[in-house]
Each structure stands twice: as structure tokens, then as C-alpha cells.
Image (tube, rainbow, N blue to C red):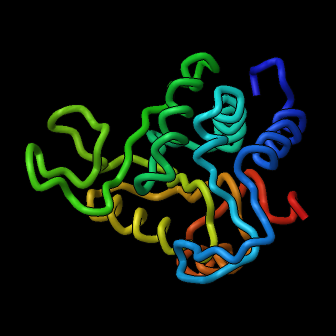
Amino acid sequence: MPSAITPQAAKMRLIEIVRRRSYGSGVEIKLASGRTSNFYFNMKPTMLDPQGSYLLALLILDALKDQACDAVGGLEMGAVPMAASVASVSVAEDHPMPAFFIRKVPKDHGTQSLIEGLPRGETLAGKRVIILEDVTTTGGSALKAIEAVRRDGATVLGVITAVDRQEGAAEAFAAAGVPFQAILTAADFA
């Protein structure tokens, strides 16, 4: 990590920000997976916080340092702020990393694109990509993203999540043969 902050210091500060801005407990909430839980992570306040966004991008770039990755992206809405932050911070870190995102449903107007952020006429064909996710429970959203980018011709190098709830995603990705890495886990907030 070329920045002045170490990965361990970045992670510790990010945990503080997530705890203050994005973590909640004590109220039953329905998750995107359909499950209910008495704790949750709404990562948008952290991903849209200047320091939270920066630290998350630094940690993702650190996780990518040994990957021959061409681009990062994931399913809307959760992956959009992460991918944009990674792309922006990557320039300052002297390792430019393009980003994209996948719509849940193609637009019904204009280009009717499912995958956004690519230059006109370009696809992900032949590109090596990392799928980003804000919060992972079962891995279902990231698996949908993987399916979409593979249909577009990309090779998926793995999935990186901001927070793994540790409720089956690692096993689902292992079964699918997709490497998985979490920046933070639910255990960081126990």
C-alpha cells in the first residue's frame, strides 16, 4: 500500500467509521438475502463518507496488489460507490483501475445496457475483473454479478466485499470456484 497509512491502521479506522455510521443492532431487519437478523450493515453512509470511502478503496487496492486485474465493479447499488472510489483512489496510488457496474435490469431506453461505465463500443470481453460487494450474506447478489460479466466475456478473478456477515457466502463462492475476500467481517463488530 503506497499510502502513508498501513493496511492495519486503515482497517482499524474503517471499523470505527462503520461502527459509527453503518452498523446497527437490536432491531430485527430483513436482509437482501431474505433472511432476518438482529444486526445489520447499511454501508452507504460509510461508502459516501470521505474518509470511509478513501479507506475502503485503499484496502481494496491493497487486496488487488497481486492480481492481474483489468477492472472492478459489481451490482447496483451497493458496488457503485465502492467501484467509483477504487477508480479515483487508484490514480493517486499510481495503479489506475477502471470501474464498471451492473444494472439489476437493463435500461429500457438509450443503450439499454446492463453493464455501465465502459467506453462506447467496449465490453468486458477478455477482461479480468474483480466483483465488489458492500455487504455479503449468502453471496447471491455477487453471484448474479458474476453471471452477468461472464455473459459479457469477462474472467472473474474473485469477489471482494466490504463486510462479510459470515452467513454462508464464503462457502457459496468456494462451491462456485470463485476466490473470496472480505475487508471486514461481522466478527470485527462482535
Which quarter of the figure has residue 158?
bottom right
Q: In this view, does 12 lie to the left or right of 137?
A: right
* Residue 74 screen position, x and y as percent: 45, 53
At 76% across and 28% down in the image, what residue appears?
1
Q: Is residue 45 above or below residue 130?
A: above
At 80% across and 64% down in the image, what residue appears?
186
Q: In this view, does 139 lie above or below 99?
A: below
Q: Nearer the viewer, residue 40 or 81?
A: 40
At 15% across and 37% down in the image, what residue appears?
121
Q: In this view, does 69 lie above or below 167?
A: above
Residue closest to the far front? 27
Q: Nearer the viewer, residue 182 or 179?
A: 182
Which quarter of the figure has residue 123?
top left
Q: In which quarter of the image is the C terminus?
A: bottom right
Q: In this view, does 28 lie to the left or right of 118?
A: right
At 38% across and 47% down in the image, what residue appears?
101
Q: Nearer the viewer, residue 176 or 99?
A: 99
Q: Is residue 57 left or right of residue 73?
A: right
* Residue 125 screen position, x and y as percent: 28, 50
* Residue 103 screen position, x and y as percent: 31, 55
Q: Which of 102 and 90 is in front in this view?
A: 102
Q: How many marks?
A: 0
